Amino acid sequence: MSPSEKAQPVVMKLLGVSLPQVHLFAVGFVTIGTILVLSLLPSDKVEANRRSHTIALPNDSEPAAVDTQKTPSSLTGTMAIKQSDGHSGNTITKSMLDKPNKQSRAWQTTTLVSGDNLTSIFKRLGLSDVDVYLVANAKQESSRLKRLKPGETVAITTDAAGQLEQVKYSRSKLEHYFYKRDGQGFDGEKVVHEPEIIQTFQQGQIENSLFLDASRAGLTDAKIMELANIFGWDIDFALDIRRGDRFSVLYEEKILEGEKVGNGNILAASFTNQGRTYDAVLFRETDNSLGYYAPDGKPMRKAFLRAPLDFTRISSNFNMRRKHPIHKKIKAHRGVDYAAPRGTPIYAAGNGKVTASAYSKANGNYVFIRHGEGFVTKYLHLTKRKVRKGQSVKQRQTIGTVGSTGYATGPHLHYEFVVNGVHRNPRTVKLPEARPIVTSKKPAFIAQTTPLLVRLKQLGGTQIASLSPNLRAADK
Ligand SMILES: [Zn+2]
């Protein structure tokens, strides 16, 4: 089997969405062979695969493609429109939206630049000072026009005689203000569009790094960070990621007028690290607070982070597996070394109190933190210390930055985890189990999370099956 034949199913699986994008860690790491395979894939196949990733919620109607330059009436019926300007029970003025004036011409739109005000905008659109005066004194929502910002848009329509008919001021794709002629003057109306939420599924396999492979699978940097944060208590993303690790994610996308306007929450996710699979699912409490849990109801969040530093700064996960020479000659090496660029933020592994923040010849700049009874974490060779002795710290708070002070030949974090006075391997030490969700919430938890987990697993299976029987077999 040639390498390219072997690569194809995996690559298709990884690349559900788009061809490789330039990325933080994507710097030329993709093998040329892989790129060739990709460019040879029939595009319709990739397209079909892409479509299969996006699934609408059971009750969602297919969003209709709407030309934003048309009159707003085309929005009604396909999108839920909410009015939030305080008029009770008055859905968008029907005369404004549902009956476009037959004589009205197309919207003329201008994008605001720095220094713009209504006068400069109207001048650009060929309107008069009288128009400025009338719209600026609209009965409702006129004050909004005094807080215009660059990047926002203003659109107008005029009638056959060239007289201003309607003004549409858009603060975002979701928030608009309409001003329409009303008697001698103008009246304004705020219109907020509620985006449709759909569920999207992506999955991939690690070939190079989490960032490279996950972005190639279609996840944004923000979503990759969210994914890593969900599993960061169980998986050391700096040292433990291996080729062949797999991930799958079910998350929300916000759609308006057939166009994606943003991402929502990760709803469920799975990460298989060195053969062990971790599943997580979102649970929304009755007070709307959100948290990630294992399917058995135990919180994903633990007392200690597995890796006490910003792993995204570590460019090559796999190279880190090589034993680096820094501690080769030190006999009893009682910690874990994270080779990372100088200045990489170091986090408190858990909530606690700083018991030492000092400098010594061997340790260089170092910080010790005590966490409750019996747990101490130690951080050595820092460039800078950012906490003082006696200070309380929160988990993931930056306590210093990676350096090479003390007995260190290169920038790295030497990290120790001490339990009741005994050094333990921070990456494998058994930590106190977090308490599962309380019994009274269990029925709601199961009702809410089971469909998400089922969907995550089904989509994962379907994807694999549709791509390659070999991969599916390998998955069992
Ligand atoms: Zn060390």
Image (tube, rainbow, N blue to C red):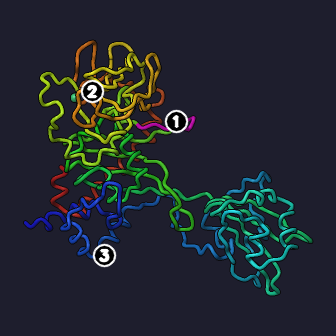
Instruction: Please say if the residues under marks 2 and 1 sit with CB atoms less than 8 Å apart.
Output: no
Picture quadrant of residue 270 = top left
Three-letter residue code for mark 3: Ser
- Say which residue label 3 marks: 43
The answer, for residue 297, to whether it is visible in the render is no
> Mark 2 or mark 1, which is nearer to you?
2
Q: x, y (%) of residue 461?
A: 27, 55
- Residue on which disc 2 sits: 406
Tell me if 104 is positioned left or right of 470 in this view. Answer: right
SS at mark 3 in the image: helix
Q: Which numbered disc, 1 or 3, marks the residue that appears first in the sequence?
A: 3
Three-letter code for the amino acid on which mark 1 is drawn = Glu
Write down which quadrant ligand 1 falls in. Answer: top left
Residue extent of the magenta highlight: 286-292
Kindly tell me whether mark 2's CB lies below 8 Å from ligand 1.
no
Q: Residue at x 27, y 21 (%)?
A: 361
Residue at 49% from the left image edge and 51% from the top image edge: 264
